Each structure stands twice: as C-alpha cells, then as structure tokens.
Image: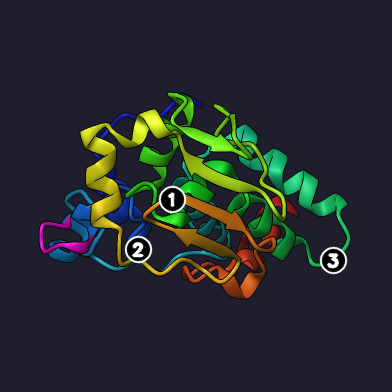
Amino acid sequence: MAKYTGPKCKLCRREGAKLYLKGERCYTDKCAFERRPYAPGEQGESRRKQSEYGQQLREKQKVRRMYGIMENQFRNYFSKAARQRGVTGENFLKLLESRLDNTVFRMGFATSRAQARQFVLHGHILVDGRKVNVPSYQVSEGDTISVKDASRKKNFIKDVLEINAEQTPPEWLSVNMEKAEGTVVSLPERDDIDQPINEQLIVEYYSL
C-alpha cells in the first residue's frame, strides 16, 4: 500500500475521531474535525449502521493512521504481539507506543508523530548519546532520549520546544524540557495510553 499524501484532516473525519496528525493546529478552532465532525463526501453527514466487520476495519485503520504506520508493518507488530506472553491487544499497543518516533512525540520534542518521525529520520534525535535515525526503533527502560545540541539551535526546533514547554508527559517518561532530554522510566502500560482505542476490535479483525 502506497504512502498517503492527501489531506490529513480528511483522515480524522473519515475515522470519526481526532488523530492529532497536524500537531498544534489540532488544538485550535482551525481543526477541520471540530468544524465538520463527519465523514467527507456527499453522504458524510448521513449515519449508516456499520457491520461488525466494518467496526473492526475502521478501528484498525484509525490506530494505523494515528501512529502513521503502513499496513504490512502494522500487521507485523500484531504478529509479534500475538507471540508474546500476556494479552495480545495490550502487547500490541505497547509495541506501538514504544516506537522512537512516538516516544519523541510523547516527550514533547515534536508537535505530532509525523514531525517526530521527520526529526528522527533527519538525525536530530539521540538515544543514549548515539544518533538513531530509525523511527520504528523500540525504546527500552532506562534509555535517554535527547535532541542533538546542534539541532536545538535551529529555530523550528526551538519553536516546538517552546510550544510544548508546559506539556505533561505520560508517567512512563521523565522529561527535562530545558535540556530537551528525557528518560524512559518504564515501558508503557495500557493505562498510559489515553487515546480512545478499542484494541479488541483489532484483535478480532486479524483473527478472521
């Protein structure tokens, strides 16, 4: 499946939920989903009852788009979660949440996951003092994530850090915004993921 390059706000409207794909704009009254909270197209405002399969598909698509992951990689995460001990759905979300790009976003070093992915790809992010440019890199407990010193001097990164200065990170992360540095205190638990996600629907979708 090719990478989606169309309007991001259309994805939020299609999934019927704010996916926070455009960073700061999503928190303002310019947010397209706030103005038109229904699916795009002529029939968008009409409410049609979804089948059980339709609900499972939409939940899968919502989470995949939320984390910005392609279908094959998303399925691979699910397969890995299914092989682990514990509840498959929870394992699955923990794997997604532990990605480096998501961790950078959660720490407040980017205004969206897409921006965090770009920062990682362009070498602005360090893990334990070492440059890691793989967005899917899985962070571990005790890892120190930081913005490279030279990158902190760039205006666009200064702006992001200023915008997110008052942001409160989830409990599994400890962040010092002045140093643009954070530590993975522990791996995320299900309770740390505050988005409205029904992972059981995704488990059912891939179990068909």
What is the C-alpha distance between the residues marked 1 and 2?
19 Å
Under circle 2, the secondary element is loop
Q: Is residue 110 left or right of residue 55?
A: left
Which x, y percent locates residue 116?
Answer: 42, 40
Task: Using the image as rendered, state which of residue 197 and residue 165 is in the foreground.
Answer: 165
Residue at numbered disc 3:
86
Which label's residue is closer to the chain start, 1 or 3? Answer: 3
Mark closer to the observer (2, 3): 3
Task: Using the image as rendered, state which of residue 170 and residue 83 is in the foreground.
Answer: 170
Which x, y percent locates residue 63?
Answer: 51, 54
Residue at numbered disc 2:
17
Please state which amino acid type lies under the numbered disc 3. Answer: Gly
**Magenta stretch: includes residue 207:** no
Q: Residue furthest bottom?
A: 191
Give the answer, above or below, for where 70 lies relative to 35: above
Please state which amino acid type lies under the numbered disc 2. Answer: Ala
Which label's residue is closer to the chain start, 2 or 3? Answer: 2
Crowd around label 2: few <14 · some 14–19 · many ≥20 (10 Å):
some
The segment highlighted magenta reads 27-31
Which x, y percent locates residue 186?
Answer: 69, 63
Give the answer, above or below, for where 76 lies relative to 184: above
Q: Main secondary structure of the magenta part?
A: loop
**Rendered residue at 70%/44% (across/down):** 77
Q: Is residue 30 left or right of residue 156?
A: left
What is the C-alpha distance between the residues marked 1 and 3?
27 Å
Which disc number belongs to residue 105?
1
